[in-house]
Amino acid sequence: MIKVGDWKECHRNGITYTIKKEEAMRYSGFTCMLSLILALCGPYALMQAGEAAQSGRYNVLFIISDDLNTNLATYGHQLVKSPNVDRVARWGLRFERAYCQFPLCNPSRASFLTGMRPDRTRVYDNSVHFRENIPECVTLPEFFRRKGYFTARVGKIFHYGVPTQIGTSGLDDPQSWDLVVNPRGRDKDEEAKIFSLIPGQFGGTLSWLAADGTDEEQTDGIGATEAIKLLEKHQNERFFLAVGFYRPHTPYVAPRKYFDLYPLDKIIVPSIPPGYFDTIPKLAVTLKKEEAAMDENLKKQAIQAYYAAITFMDAQLGRVLDAVERLHLRNNTIIVMTSDHGYHMHEHGLWQKRTLFEESTRVPLLIAVPGTKHAGKSTRAIVEMVDLYPTLAELCGFQPPANLDGTSLVSILNNPDLPGKQVAITQVTRTVQKQIVFGYTVRTARWRYTEWDDGNQGKELYDHEADPQEMRNLANDPQYAQVMVELSKLLPKRNK
């Protein structure tokens, strides 16, 4: 295992770069100039001892947007402008029914980056590092590093708090990377300007800012610039480059021009009928008192800001994609565009994440493989984020590790009409009388069924054929009792 102490951390123009200390010290008069750092990071120089380089079939460009839901043009949203996410969709296959395993940043990322479900990583909150529980696991980027790939991270891939840990490595996994870049922009430095429902709180609270300045001054703008430099430097090598955009995670910060794209009179706030919360279990409701007190205009402002942050992020994605095209990397690079989980914008009367509804569990997922015959198409196959690890390994010509929980999606990439999995499973936690209880949900082609604390704290059943918005809970209707019995068999039980 590579320890943090084995790494050399350097700072230049407000950006943190990290490389292995032993490599840096080989050069007399070592400086922290980026050009020298990159010169040290060839795909063979930093390989782990005893592992021969293996030439994989493709490069991997793995892009994650933090807290991004499917409010995107390519997924049919009529207002949000996301031309560059759309571009990835035109290059590859769009997955209509992809689901995360835990709708919270750290548990979700720990899951799909290790290929293990949350009950194996035992990461259920934003404070635990997965290696505390599974120290010997080989992560997705580490797998490629061991195969001789140059692996690099720009921005948030493994978890760290936003905005508190912007500019740091947070809960990163050093042994996964040859090089890491931690951008920090004026969005972090100008937090005093940000509006928040709870003054002084930003990361877990609805908060936003129509910022002054240029895209390139924002953290994501800086991250895009650094990602482009890495593509240019390593275009003739096998690489696994992970680019983690911070937006649209709160605070929703974007240059003012992106807010102007979404006039408040065009924003529609999803509504709920009177008494709606009485029809679902208490643990299904995550509404904070500050959110409940918002008037209609403030709700529109929050939605406007979220949309603006999406379009700003999309513009930075576009800069990276432009570099991919300019460098002629499309013919040898797999591109994955996704998020860590979904997100509520007042659907079900709720905001943000950590629910087991469709809006929170469903993620955008686009995979563009060179030479695909299905570019621009979509699939309704049910898939899970935990499937990404074995998929990328197989696509690049490698045997995936045997201990992964996911299933390769290569067959679906070759034939989008395949049905995929029978079910997708997502879980979340709640605190009840100072005790942690679990909620699990199963999504099939027709149904979503949810149990809180093995059903002791409530159940939910939704028929997606008749109710795709999941607004009518059928769990108390006797005619669906047998349906629930069968679906319940598919869920893990904690109170055996």
Image (tube, grey):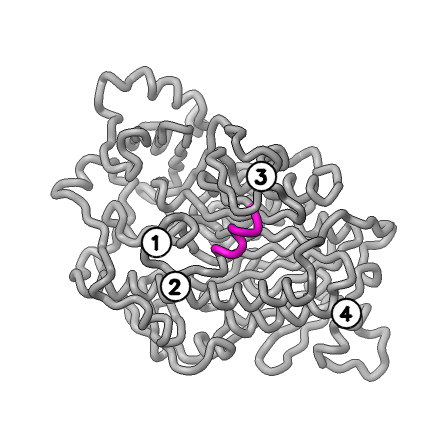
Q: Earlier in the sequence, mark 2 or mark 1?
A: 2
Q: Measuring from the top left, give residue 291's x and y in whole percent.
A: 23, 58
The three-letter amino acid code for the residue at tag 1 is Gln
For marks 1 and 3, give the one nearer the viewer: 3
Quadrant location of the C terminus in the rendered image: top left
Distance (Cα) linking label 3 and label 4: 34 Å
Can you identify the residue that label 4 sits on?
A: 21
Q: Is residue 108 above or below residue 418?
A: below
Query: Residue at position x 32%, y 58% from top?
Result: 79
Badge 1 element: strand
Q: Report which quarter residue 240 is drawn in.
A: bottom right
The disc labelled 4 sits on which kind of residue? Lys
Looking at the rendered structure, the secondary structure element under dot 4 is: helix
Q: Secondary structure at mark 3?
A: helix
Distance Cα–Cα, label 2 vs label 3: 27 Å
Q: Which residue does the numbered mark 3 point to in the structure image?
A: 387
Please name the residue that numbered disc 2 is placed on. 250
| x and y, in percent, of residue 88 in the image | 54, 54
User: Tag 3 or tag 1, which sits nearer the N-term?
Assistant: 1
Q: Name the residue: 59% across, 43% down.
A: 388
Q: Is residue 405 visible?
A: no
Q: For marks 1 and 4, give the CA distance.
A: 40 Å
Q: Comparing marks 3 and 4, which lies closer to the viewer?
A: 3
Which residue position holds label 1?
352
- Across and down, in percent, residue 4 comes to 68, 63
The residue mark sitting in front, 2 or 3, is 3
Q: Earlier in the sequence, mark 1 or mark 4?
A: 4
